[in-house]
Image: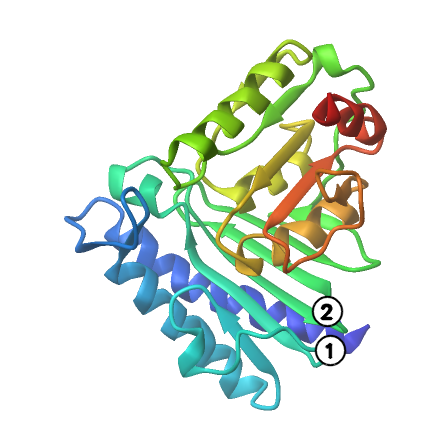
Amino acid sequence: MAETDHFLAVGVEAAKIAGDVIREGFHQTKSIEHKGLVDLVTETDKACEDLIFKHLKKTFPEHKFIGEETSAAFGTVELTDEPTWIADPLDGTTNFVHGFPFVCVSIGLTVNKVPIVGVVYNPILDELFTAIRGQGAFLNGTSIKASSQTELVKSILATEIGTKRDKQTIDETTGRINTLLYKVRSIRMSGSCAMNLCGIACGRLDMCYEHGFGGPWDVAAGAVIVEEAGGSVFDPSGGVFDITSRRIAASNGYLKDMFISAMKE
């Protein structure tokens, strides 16, 4: 337990270092690059990833590192069974560019490909979500639990539309949303997969799903936070969640089977 506590403490330190940079740059003019038609990256993304991995590598030089922006500079992008830090230095880059406060640092640690430590920090709202597998989930140090909602029609569902703008992807995405909208109370799009998962963990949201997100850095931290809050993380098809699949669904502890059935219809 002492070892995992140490992992978490250093992960939190790294998240707060990056968070300071995000907070400072939030209201300033951004230097923006396009990874795609609507997929953005800023100098802040790159600077934060560098800071995160330098801090982690200083303490855990034997560990592996995977990040969204510059993973090639620190190690392989292939996930192995070895202890591996997986970081998204700024989840919600488009929000950051537009001054919308749903932005966060996401840092997860996997062992044997299983997330065991999760840190998600929103420096704009000053919310720090943390979890160690087997030890519960917390928001700013206070224990959190997923919601107790048992009815789909009274549930809030979160999803994202992604960054692809080809007709087939848009039609599939909007078709899925149209089908689910008949079955739930309302749908939200925060612009951050990690923040959506934390929303499940603290009971603000009841369910979420996303197809085709960037990579394991979007979900490595959030997955363990949801599970430690009493929620479920799984593949949208109903299968076992695979951190490398770029597909995720999550719910509180009561809605999983109903949610899976609704997504299959």
Q: Residue at x 39, y 72 (%)?
A: 70
Based on the displayed image, in which of its 4 quarters is residue 46 positioned?
Answer: bottom left
Residue 253 image point, x, y percent: 83, 33
Q: How is the image coloured?
A: rainbow
Q: Foreground residue, 12 or 184?
A: 184
Q: Quadrant of the C terminus?
A: top right
Residue 80 image point, x, y percent: 68, 77
Q: Is residue 250 left or right of residue 9?
A: right
Q: Is residue 6 left or right of residue 190?
A: right
Q: CA distance from mark 2 to mark 1?
A: 5 Å
For label 2, the crowd category at 10 Å Cα-Cα, with few meaning under 14, some 14 to 19 and many 20 or more, is: some
Question: In this rendering, is residue 2 above or below 150?
Answer: below
Query: What is the count of numbered marks?
Result: 2
- Sequence order check, earlier mark of 2 and 1: 1
SS at mark 2? Answer: loop
The label number, if any, that marks residue 113 in the structure image: 2
Q: Quadrant of the N terminus?
A: bottom right
Question: In this rendering, is residue 204 above or below 104?
Answer: above
Q: Residue at x 32, y 51 (%)?
A: 23
Q: Is residue 82 left or right of residue 253?
A: left
Residue 151 image point, x, y percent: 79, 15
Q: Mark 1 belongs to which amino acid?
A: Asp
Residue 198 image point, x, y percent: 61, 42
Q: Residue at x 63, y 33 (%)?
A: 208
According to the picture, the residue beneath numbered tag 1 turns out to be 81
